[in-house]
Image (spheres, grey):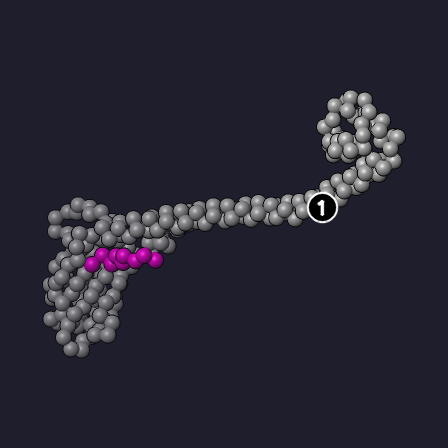
Amino acid sequence: MKFTCGIVEDLLPLYLEDMCSEETRAALEEHLRECPACGEKLARLKDGAAVSQAKKEERSLPIAGYAKKVKRHRIRVGITVTLICAMAACVLALLGLTVIDMRREANPHVFEVEDGVYNLASAALESTAEEIGQYTFYTNSTKIRVTVERDGEFHGTVMLWDTRYSDSFIQMSEVDEKADTCVFTAGSAARRYKITCDGLPGAKITVSDGREVSFWKSLAHVVKGLIGG
């Protein structure tokens, strides 16, 4: 099979792409051996193809680098979003536990106590300085808060007694119109208490279990429980 130069020129791109049949390839190669002009055309086509491939590779390098950057960015964003979601979930859980602790603190369990004993967990007691000593108190808190109200200037003392040992004295606190509240600490549900006043005639006395409903206090209590402190 003999090809003219025109046919060879048309077939050269297919030849370079290896898309010719074996018979056509053989005829082309025979013509190229005998025709220097077509050989030069083939060489030019090869050079052009090489340059085109090089340019294509050069263009592909920035694209590949950009694709890697995009992939790394997406991974970082994914990790960041995951961490933020995990932290948000922890914060929400911590807030939820804190609210539960605040509710528990605001609404303590009221245990039954014997007759003649005033349960401070159920409510505060309002009395007078002259009559407060008639009451016996129970608390399931660690504190007993005493507030004194009296017109004008005053100065007196509030005393806490333990009834288990024939009214054994525990603690005393001075009060006046500027510092009208005292808090006795280290309370125990196992004890029963009495409170007396001295130097406070006509004063109104309010006794409570000293509970303080505080977000920060409950938060600290929850965190301490979580870390096992």
**In the image, is residue 31 above or below residue 141?**
above
**In the image, is residue 207 above or below residue 156?**
above
Query: Residue 51 at what x, y percent from top left?
Result: 75, 44
**Which stretch did the figure color magenta?**
208-216
Q: Residue at x 78, y 33 (%)?
A: 6
Q: Would residue 178 be visible to someone looking at this image?
A: yes
- Please tell me whether mark 1 sits on a helix, a strand or a loop: helix
Q: Residues within 10 Å of mark 1 (few under 14, many from 20)?
A: few
Query: 70 and 130: which one is in front?
Result: 70
Q: Residue at x 78, y 39 (%)?
A: 45
Left/right placement of residue 77 relative to residue 198 reads right
Query: Identity of the amino acid at label 1?
Result: Lys
Query: Residue 162 at what x, y percent from top left?
Result: 22, 56
Left/right placement of residue 87 relative to residue 161 reads right
Query: 93 and 127: which one is in front?
Result: 93
Q: How many marks?
A: 1
**In the image, is residue 65 above or below residue 172?**
above
Query: 215 and 181: which one is in front?
Result: 215
Q: Is residue 176 in the magenta section?
A: no
Which secondary structure dominates the residues rendered in magenta?
A: loop
Q: Which residue has dot 1 on it? A: 55
